[in-house]
Amino acid sequence: MMRSYFTRLLIVAGFFLLLLGAGVLMTQEGGRAPLNPEPVAAASGIYDFCMSPDGRSIAFISGQTGSSEIWTANVAGGQPRKVTDTAGIKKHVRWSNDGKWIAYVAVQPGKAGDIRLVNAADGNEIAVTKTLADEREPVWSPDSRSIAFTERIAGRNRIAIADLETLEVRTLVEISASSLQWSPDGKAIVFVSDPLLSDDKRDNDDLFLISAEGGPPKLLTPGTQRYRDYSPSWSPDSRSIAYASESSGFSNIYVVDTQSGSRRRLTNENVESFAPKWSPNGQSIAYVRNEDAQFHLWVTPAEGGVPAKISDRDGVNGGLEDEDTNFRGGLQWTVEGDRIAFTHSDPGRTSDLWMARLDGTRALQVTNSMPPELRRETRFVSPDFLTYRSFDSQEVSALVYKPRGVKPRTGHPALLVFRDALEGQHAKNWDPFIQFFVSDGYVVFAPNVRGSSGRGKEYRQMVFEHGGDYDVRDAFIGLDRLSSEGLIDAERVGVFGAGTGGFLVTAAIVKDETRFKAAVCLYGIVDAVTAVSYPEMAGWARYMIGSSPMTAPLPYFERSLVNFVDKLRTPIIFLYTGSDASAPFQQLQQFAVQAEVKGKWFDYRVFENESEGWRYWRPNNLRLSLEAMDALFEKHLLGRDREIRLSRNR
């Protein structure tokens, strides 16, 4: 009898373990499996790359080993090879036309950049510049003997050219410039600049052409004042330039003849198209088309015709070669002109290099930067696309990430996330913060509030002088919509954001003192008045808040958290970098003094070895940030007993 009892007991125990194992499996595949912050933080992607002139290799910048380094990979496959092994962040990788050297920008502490070369074969390096100035955007001359670049120091800007034999540098023109492109025949350089003496609305950019020998620049896009013309790309015969222009109200693709100045439009849509790249044979132009938070590659005949979509995976394909954007990336034709290399990211993949053919076959992945334990796409959540009407009936779109599993009776806990960049947007790409928190049971609400890109010039500029007000109200209306539908629990809502998003976090907890149970500000502005005095932020403040604190005192007062410490009811942590001119540690100090004296809870961490936005942070620092945010939200939204101890001693 006793033996029979134990036999039955063992059978029941075995069956229970089997069910438990099946339950775990169901949780991982069909339910919710919280992600480990360490591999999530290590999923640093590839955004900056260039093809070798023979088309056989790709050089790219990756932080997969814990530091920013240049690697090369064979297009046909094989293991990537590390080319550099030096400290500091690297940007703007560019391969010389003779295939011998790779130029790049080495970012120094304080965010100033120097131009350097690394030998593609043996890794030897040459410092082209080593100054206190900020030098960026290196472009090679067709003969590989010179490099043009931009330079800024003490309020002065210029385009300079370095002779690589003598390392002598000469001024080409004194002007603020970006997007330099050297013509294939070597005779001229096209660049983007804003000629307006006052452009607080940030709504003007033009194309200029200058001889490589010097002289006055020639305006290529007259008559488009108060519109942006940008992202130039030379035709192979050096006679025409493809570019993006928002002169129609939305960014479309145009071509301008450099001799006659005549212009023609290749696309005519109420969506955003940009980043044109001319094919090697001059017959086609590839570009990126942004619609409903998805970016796809398209190719159109250079003489006009019906464009064709090339990318086959949803997400962010390509992007802008611009540091101040949420969707960095790029595309480049192969030398044969039958394929396009590009970056691709989606909610289940960090940004990597892919290769697409023009014949409609599926694109092939060239690199894989996801840690092995994160390569099962079913672990991640793709967002729902939502549109709603805001306080003034303006339509706002948003991405809503819903956790797997059963919805609680009162709704899910929720996190509002603001976009990072001043003119960026939330797109359907990889975001470690979003995926980490949605895996832990939070609804993550990512609205593209007014001021975001992707909806045309008018929508982007609706936030002019109303940043921290209209955009925050847009987000509140969206949260109320989710609450009214029963998706989220309005009593368990947190908020976070970085950069401009960090500022919007502070504005949000000022505007509604009780809405959020916890907040995280990553290197955001807490005192707009002092921000005006920062060279890096003066234009930002004039655009977001007003022309100056003296002419617009009330907006500057109302949108500065430092003025409302007495009323602060939201626990908040701050994450700053050691040497960021856009949001220096002074901002945190101004808040901290008042908060300490008035007994308000906050905590902070300063990552002394970082100077850029979180996408450039070392994996360990990103992991520490995720863990701190996780503890804060669990304690104040979920009611769990979590200790939060960053830098304050209590």
Image (spheres, helix red, strand yellow):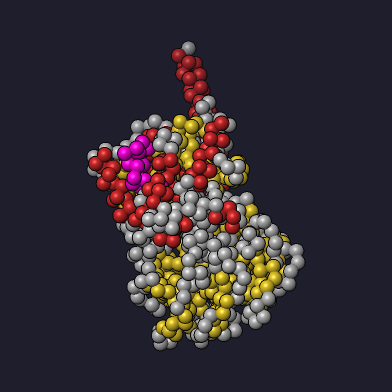
Question: Is residue 560 a member of the stretch shown in magenta?
Answer: yes
Give residue 203's quadrant in the image: bottom right
Is residue 561 shown left or right of residue 238?
A: left
Measured along the vertical axis of the image, is residue 18 above or below residue 551?
above
Give residue 268's quadrant in the image: bottom right
Q: Nearer the viewer, residue 180 or 370?
A: 180
The total number of labels drawn is 0
Point 72% across, 63% down: residue: 307
- Can residue 341 be seen from the camera position used here? no
Measured along the vertical axis of the image, is residue 22 above or below residue 349?
above
| Quadrant of the drawing holding the C terminus | top left
Measured along the vertical axis of the image, is residue 380 above or below residue 283?
above
Place of residue 354 in the rendered image (x, y in percent of width and height, measured from the top left): 59, 61
- Can residue 479 be seen from the camera position used here? yes
Place of residue 113 in the rendered image (x, y in percent of width and height, measured from the top left): 39, 70
Question: Is residue 469 a member of the stretch shown in magenta?
Answer: no
Point 54% across, 65% down: residue: 204
Point 70% across, 71% down: residue: 264
Q: Nearer the viewer, residue 240 or 621?
A: 240
Place of residue 566 in the rendered image (x, y in percent of width and height, measured from the top left): 31, 39
| Residue situated furthest right in the rendering | 305
Measured along the vertical axis of the image, is residue 36 above or below residue 279?
above
Give residue 304's quadrant in the image: bottom right
| Residue situated furthest front in the rendering | 551
The boundaries of the magenta stretch are 559-574
Place of residue 634 in the rendered image (x, y in percent of width and height, measured from the top left): 40, 36
Point 46% across, 18% down: residue: 6
